[in-house]
Image (cartoon, grey):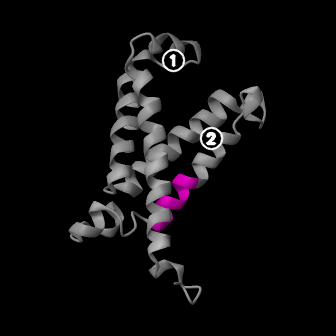
Amino acid sequence: MITDANLKESIMHDITHWGIRASIGAIFIVHSLKKFDPSWQEWLISIGIPPEMQLPIALAEFIGGVLLVIGILTRISSSVFAVILLGAIFHIRWENGFFVSKGGWEWDLIMLAAVLTIIVVGPGRISISHLVRKIPRFLQ
């Protein structure tokens, strides 16, 4: 039982942090799958992004998602996701307003807050980075 406010040392903190990391990773993995379909290039063109960006975006989301779930290179993956989410907010969804029900950016903002938290906190103790312990902190 937790008797003080030192959550950083509690198992609940570790499980919660892993849950956030795994959830964000899983969301990006699932969303990456449709981006491997060649027809996704047409949508990229419609929003002014070169079709050659299809594979780099799909791979960044898939590989980054896997890295988040297993807990290695989490700060780098989260940084890439932050850039992707900022692009989604300002390039794709901004004109639709805030509410997701109208195609807005509120969900992207929640995801952005989560990846920024992961960048600050790092991989946590339930991660390969924690098990290996030889990975430099800035790469965790």
Give the image location of residue 33, x and y in percent.
40, 26
Q: Which mark is residue 44?
A: 1
Instruction: Answer few, some or many: residues within 10 Å of disc 2's Cα (few below 14, many 20 plus, some between 14 and 19).
Output: many
Q: Nearer the viewer, residue 12 or 53?
A: 12
Q: Is residue 109 above or below residue 117?
A: above
Badge 1: few (under 14), some or many (20 or more) residues near its Cα, within 10 Å? some
Residue 73 within the magenta-colored segment of the rendering: no
Residue span colored magenta: 114-121
Mark found first going from the N terminus, 1 or 2: 1
In this rendering, would 20 be left or right of 60?
right
Q: Name the amino acid, label 2.
A: Asp
Q: For the residue labelled by badge 1, is the local secondary structure a helix, a strand or a loop? A: helix
Disc 2 element: helix
Q: CA distance from mark 1 to mark 2?
A: 18 Å
Label 1 with label 2: CB-CB less than 8 Å: no
Name the residue located 37 percent from the left edge and 50 percent from the top edge: 69
Classify the position of the C terminus by image quarter.
bottom left
Q: Which residue is mark 2?
A: 108
- Residue 110 versus residue 51 in the image, above or below: below
Q: Residue at x 50, y 63 (%)?
A: 16
- Give the x, y percent position of residue 114: 56, 54
Q: Nearer the viewer, mark 1 or mark 2?
A: 2
What predominant SS class does the magenta segment belong to? helix
Residue type marked 1: Leu
